Amino acid sequence: MELEILTAKSSKSIATITVNPNTTIGAIKQQLYELKKAPYVQRQSLRLDAKGKALADSETVKSLSLRVGDKLYYKDLGPQISWKTVFLVEYAGPLVIYLWLYQRPWLFYGDVVSTKVDCTVNCAAICWTIHYAKRLLETLFVHRFSHATMPLRNLFKNCSYYWLFAMYVAYHINHPLYTPPSKLYFYAGLATFALCELGNLFIHLALRDLRPPGSTVRKIPVATGNLWTLLFNFVSCPNYTYEIGSWIGFTIMTSCLPAGLFTLAGAYQMTMWALGKHRAYKKEFSQYPKARKAIFPFIL
C-alpha cells in the first residue's frame, strides 16, 4: 500500500511511500531520508495530522490503523544534538567555572593571594565537584535516554542556566569577604547534601535497570532491595526529590543567598518536569499506583 507524505506547514506533498502493515514510522523516516525528501531521521517528525502529536518511531502502519490513501504530515525539527553531548557540555561548564573561581582569579577578586580560605569554602568546592563529576559519570555510564537527540537550540539555553548560575554562586562563596555559617548549619547542611547525593545516585541506577540497553522500553518504576529507593513508594520522580534535597543541604551548609536562589530555580523546574512525568505515567499505565505524588511525598 502507499502513503502520501505532506508537509505539516503547507500540506504540500513531498513523497509517496510504499509500506506494509509492519512498516514502522522509523522505517518511513529512513525512506524519506534515502529519497532525499527529508534530512536525517532524528530531525524528522511525522504526525497523523498537521498539528497533531509526533508519532513514535516504534509505531507501525497496523498499530496506527493506516489505510491506502491515508496521509502523514512531516515537520523538520531543525538541527539536532545528542542528549549525551548536551548533558556533558552543560555539566562540565559549572565544574570548570566553579573551580576556576575557587582559585580566586585576579580578574574577579583582585590580588587576594594572602587571604585565608575558610574550611566551609573548601568543603563547598568539594561538594560542588562531587555533584557535577557524578553527573558527568552518570551521563557516560548510567543514563539510558529514551530519545537520541534534542534541538540544538536547547544546548545554549541549558548551558546559559547552568553556567551563569555556577558563576553567580561561586563568586559569592569564594569571595574574600564571605562569612561562613555556624558549625551547626555547616554539619547539618553537609550531612543533608551527602545523604541526598547518595539517594539520587541509587535512584538513577534503579531507573537504568528498568530499560534494557539500546531500547526505549518504559516500565513502572518501583522500589528495589535498596533502602534508598523506598521513595518510589511515595513519589514518581524521587531523583528530583533527592536532587532538591542536595541543593537545600548545600544552601544550609554555605548559608549563601545565591545558592538558595539556585535551589529555588532548580526546584521549580524539576517540579514542572516531575508533574509532566507523573501525568505521563498515569496515562500510560492503567495500574499506576494512585497514592503516589509527583515529587514531594503526600503533598505534590
Image: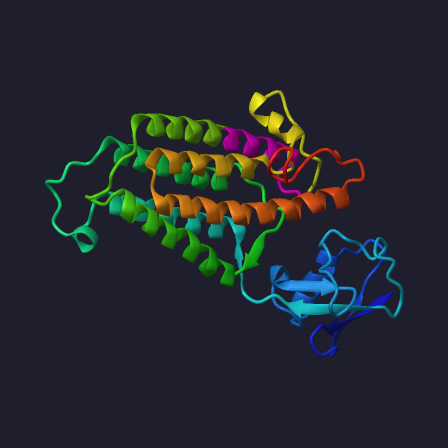
Position of 52 with respect to 242 (left or right) is right
Position of 17 with respect to 227 (left or right) is right
**Percent x, y of residue 160:** 41, 57
Q: Is residue 210 above or below residue 100?
A: above
- Give the image quarter of residue 19: bottom right
- Give the image quarter of residue 20: bottom right
Prevailing secondary structure class for the magenta stretch in the rendered image: helix
**Percent x, y of residue 114:** 10, 40
Residue at left 72%, top 54%? 56
Q: Is residue 188 above or below residue 112?
A: above
197 or 294, nearer to the observer = 294
Tell me, yes or no, whether the highlighted magenta stretch contains residue 208: yes
Highlighted range, magenta: 199-216
* Image quarter of the N terminus: bottom right
Look at the image and tell me whether residue 178 can be seen: yes
Q: How is the image coloured?
A: rainbow
Tell me, yes or no, whether the highlighted magenta stretch contains residue 101: no
Look at the image and tell me whether residue 130 can be seen: no
Residue at left 36%, top 49%? 166
Residue at left 45%, top 40%? 135
* Image quarter of the C terminus: top right
